[in-house]
Amino acid sequence: MTAEVLGAVVPSRAVGAEVISGAEEAELSFRGAVDELDSAGAPFVVVDLGGGSTEVVVGTAAEGVSASYSADIGCVRLTERCLHSDPPSAAEVTAARGVVRERLADALRVVPVQGARTWVGVAGTMTTLSALAHHLTVYDSAAIHLSRVGYDQLLAVCDRLIGMTRAQRSALGSRRSTIGGTSRPPSPAIAAPIPKPASTSPG
């Protein structure tokens, strides 16, 4: 939100409204996401997958953000661009994955995730994925906050969602009714250790 738009919505004498830079937003989001995590899991990669963009931030609790990037891709934008069938066709899913790879490649050229030890997901999309991975029937912030989802488990949930019809996703109820989402629960972090390739040598 720009200062001009904010000024039109919030009276100039109101207290508490402030437009911050992208760098400040990345820093604040990162601090909030990793504050309760064990520092032994650092460096952390924090990912906020939204409707129109995806933020990728890397850093440590002690030193803060070392790099960040806002990729021009999100759930709603990707759905509108690529996923038109119900459920999405194989060709549409392939096209969507190609767009994601292209946009995230830009992010990963800026944000060095290779040395990170833990990925942290924040906001509604990630909390919904955690709820599904843990077979929750209703949103439970206490169960989701700081929950862990393994890499293979996360991929299985994503594959399940992409194969559903809109009606089937709606039947998930309060966890998230569409890919883009009509309800956005609070945003506690979920974290999972980054899987190491089988060929990686110790040290």
Image (cartoon, rainbow, N blue to C red):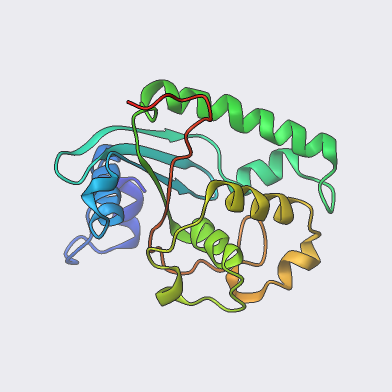
In percent of width and height, residue 196 lies at: 47, 34
Say which residue appears at 51% left-offset and 30% top-offset: 197
Q: Nearer the viewer, residue 130 or 17?
A: 130
- Residue 17 appears in the picture as rendered: yes
Q: Nearer the viewer, residue 16 or 95?
A: 95
**Residue placed at 55% from the left, 63% from the top?**
128
Q: Can I make out residue 20 in this image?
A: no
Q: Is residue 96 left or right of residue 52?
A: right
Instruction: Pick the quarter of the image with the C terminus.
Output: top left
Q: Count the labels in the image.
A: 0
- Depth order, front residue of 12/178: 178
Judging depth in this view, the residue of 16 and 94 nearest the camera is 94
Rendered image quadrant of residue 133: bottom right
Q: Residue at x 56, y 68 (%)?
A: 134
Q: Check the image and report above or below for 100 versus 130.
A: above
Q: Is residue 87 above or below residue 183?
A: above
Residue 16, given in percent of the width and then of the height, sits at 19, 64
Residue 167 lies, with reference to residue 56, above or below; the image says below
> What is the x, y in percent for residue 49?
49, 48
